[in-house]
């Protein structure tokens, strides 16, 4: 009986150490990153560089990467692109990702959705955020005042070569609009 009590006490002590309470009242159980806000113009001029602004935080301060995947009507999903988070941004980050777009007028008939999520070093993932976009011949939108403080903070590029579903269905790649 004494051995059982000792074993239970040791187990409870170890459990108490593993779930040490933090000053904010939470335990040190690993928590996922949180995407606080995003902004991107929904309409892009073909050939423009599209900027997607992002604010994220991680209570544990160990954000590792931003995962981006684009879905397109008539095509499906492009491969996932990974942008590594700089060590100084592992707790909080704010800035923009950019996507180079081809100057192809046949993109006007397609619709796209960019899905973003942030992953930490433990493999915890934020809730995904969807950012819809499409193309048209419009003037670029002005950046809202709430994003001006991070207007020049480049987080990285979304290195995916998009093409119109029209060109894809014709066999792709030989479209003459390659930007890479």
Image (cartoon, helix red, strand yellow):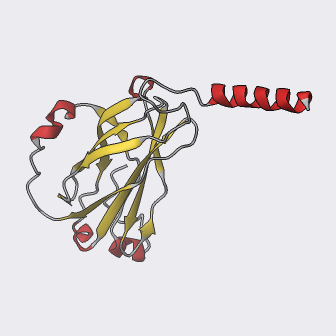
> Looking at this view, is 30 or 10 the one in front?
10
Q: Position of residue 110 (x, y in %)?
A: 28, 71
Which corner quadrant holds the N terminus?
top right
166 relative position to 49: left or right: right
What residue lies at 72% left-to-right and 30% top-to-bottom? 12
Q: Closer to the camera, 113 or 16?
A: 16
Q: What is the count of numbered marks?
A: 0
Tell me what residue is drawn at x 21 percent, y 51 percent: 48
**Picture coordinates of residue 17, whole percent (x, y):** 65, 25
Q: Quadrant of residue 169?
A: bottom left
| Residue found at the very far front of the displayed protein | 1
Q: Quadrant of residue 139?
A: bottom left
- x 12%, y 63%: residue: 137
* Quadrant of the image occupied by residue 154: top left
Q: Position of residue 2 (x, y in %)?
A: 90, 27
Q: Is residue 45 left or right of residue 118?
A: left
Q: Is residue 8 left or right of residue 30?
A: right
Residue 134 x, y percent position in the rendering: 24, 64
Tell whether 171 sits left or right of 164.
right
- The answer to whether 60 is drawn above or below residue 166 in the figure is above
């Amino acid at each position: 009986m004494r051995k059982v009590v000792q074993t239970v006490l040791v187990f409870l002590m170890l459990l108490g150490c593993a779930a040490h309470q933090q000053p904010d009242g939470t335990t040190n159980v690993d928590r996922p990153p949180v995407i606080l806000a995003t902004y991107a113009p929904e309409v892009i001029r073909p050939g423009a560089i599209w900027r997607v602004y992002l604010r994220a935080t991680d209570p544990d301060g160990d954000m590792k990467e931003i995962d981006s995947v684009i879905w397109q009507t008539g095509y499906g999903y492009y491969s996932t692109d990974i942008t590594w988070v700089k060590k100084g941004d592992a707790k909080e980050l704010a800035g923009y990702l950019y996507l180079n777009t081809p100057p192809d007028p046949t993109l006007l008939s397609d619709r796209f959705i960019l899905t973003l999520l942030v992953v930490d070093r433990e493999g915890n993932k934020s809730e995904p955020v969807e950012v819809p976009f499409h193309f048209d011949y419009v003037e670029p939108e002005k950046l809202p005042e709430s994003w001006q403080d991070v207007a020049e903070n480049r987080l990285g590029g979304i290195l995916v070569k998009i093409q119109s579903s029209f060109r894809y269905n014709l066999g792709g790649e030989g479209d003459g609009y390659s930007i890479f």
